[in-house]
Image: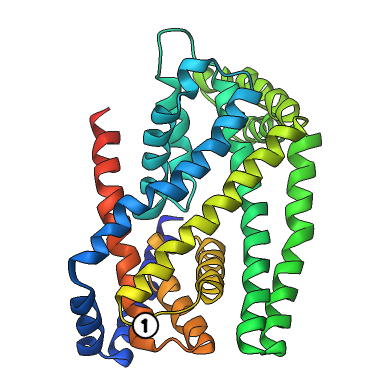
Amino acid sequence: MKWTMRIALLLGTSLCVVLVLRAGLAPILGLLASAGWTLLWLAPLHALPLGLDVLGWQALLRAAGVDPPRTALARLFVIASCREAVNRLLPVANVGGEIVGIRMLCRVGEAPAPVAAIAASVVAEVLLTIISQLLFAAAGVLLLLYRTGKVAVASELLVGLGLSVPLIAGLYMLVHRGSVFERLLRALEGVLDLPVQLRGLLDQAVALDARLRALLTHAAALFSTMGWQLAGFAAGTLETWLALRWLQHPVGFATAVALESLTQAIRHFIFVVPAGLGVQEAGLVGLGYLLGVGNDASIALSLTKRMREIAFGVPALAYWQLT
């Protein structure tokens, strides 16, 4: 896996360099210079979509029976910031942040941590995020069709999204009906000679499966979480909309939704590339071409997003290390 990620990083970096050179470094720097320090407002603005996501996680934690001190909104916001920073800035294939979040929340308070309940809330949140992102991407395809009239492109994208529906449904049913973590640990136990300490994890795996199945029966909490997540995706579109205006390439909000939703979907689909380097740039350039946004503006937008990720994420990583 390490070699795969290293190769993916090399390819992604090469693709990013090629795209920057083709668009022209001077025009890109000119657009960034024209926006200036105004772009720094995107860092505090990111608190809005992240806060909406946190409200969704809070609903799942409460449905899982986690005690109130651990579900305080401010505390969850800080932990969610660390989760996102780890996933966005470190080579962890978009899953390391979830492990970090579970560990940080388990350390809160003096009472014994309900590890299974906390872990179940995170697993359920990730599953619901996949579903919400699929819906958001579908809305982006429809808006792309509305803005460009390119039926063939929109049809191909919808077919691609449609092919993922059975996989997501199968994953949901597997988590909801099966004993995924218990079976996984038993499979490892049958293949490897697990130490005594790791064999004790079997009981925790059984508890996690039970908590997860129980949590997925709370329909109200699940729909509430998805509603907050979709609101968070919509609020995140403000970053693209404002950034392009400040970069002297204003677009309508529908165009911004199409750009944001499909770029995020591409970046999460090709998750093996650390930080989505090259993937995000290629997605924005391709979609920008369809939507009338120049290559230089698309690359400048991507660099602006990365600047925001660093400005928002590095303090979160520092806090995580300190704690």
Answer with left or right where residue 29 lies relative to residue 66: left
Closest to the observer, 216 or 75:
75
User: Residue 162 in the image: x percent, y percent?
Assistant: 76, 68
Closest to the observer, 203 or 23:
23
* Residue 133, quarter of the rendered image: bottom right
* Residue 152, quarter of the rendered image: bottom right
**132 in relation to 278, above or below:** above
Answer with left or right where residue 103 lies relative to residue 176: left
User: Residue 234 in the image: x percent, y percent?
Assistant: 54, 58
Closest to the observer, 181 or 312:
312
- Give the residue at the far top of this rendering: 111
User: Residue 225 in the image: x percent, y percent?
Assistant: 63, 40
Closest to the observer, 91 or 46:
46
**316 in relation to 300, above or below:** above
Q: Amino acid at mark 1?
A: His
Report if residue 314 is visible in the image: yes
Identify the residue at horizontal 75%, vertical 67% (top origin).
163
Identify the residue at horizontal 73%, vertical 54% (top origin).
168
Report if residue 10 is visible in the image: no
**Are there few (<14), some (14-19), or many (20+) residues within 10 Å of tag 1?**
some
**27 in relation to 228, above or below:** below
Residue position marked by numbered label 1 in the rendering = 249
User: Residue 293 in the image: x percent, y percent?
Assistant: 44, 86
SS type, badge 1: loop
Identify the residue at horizontal 38%, vertical 42% (top origin).
81
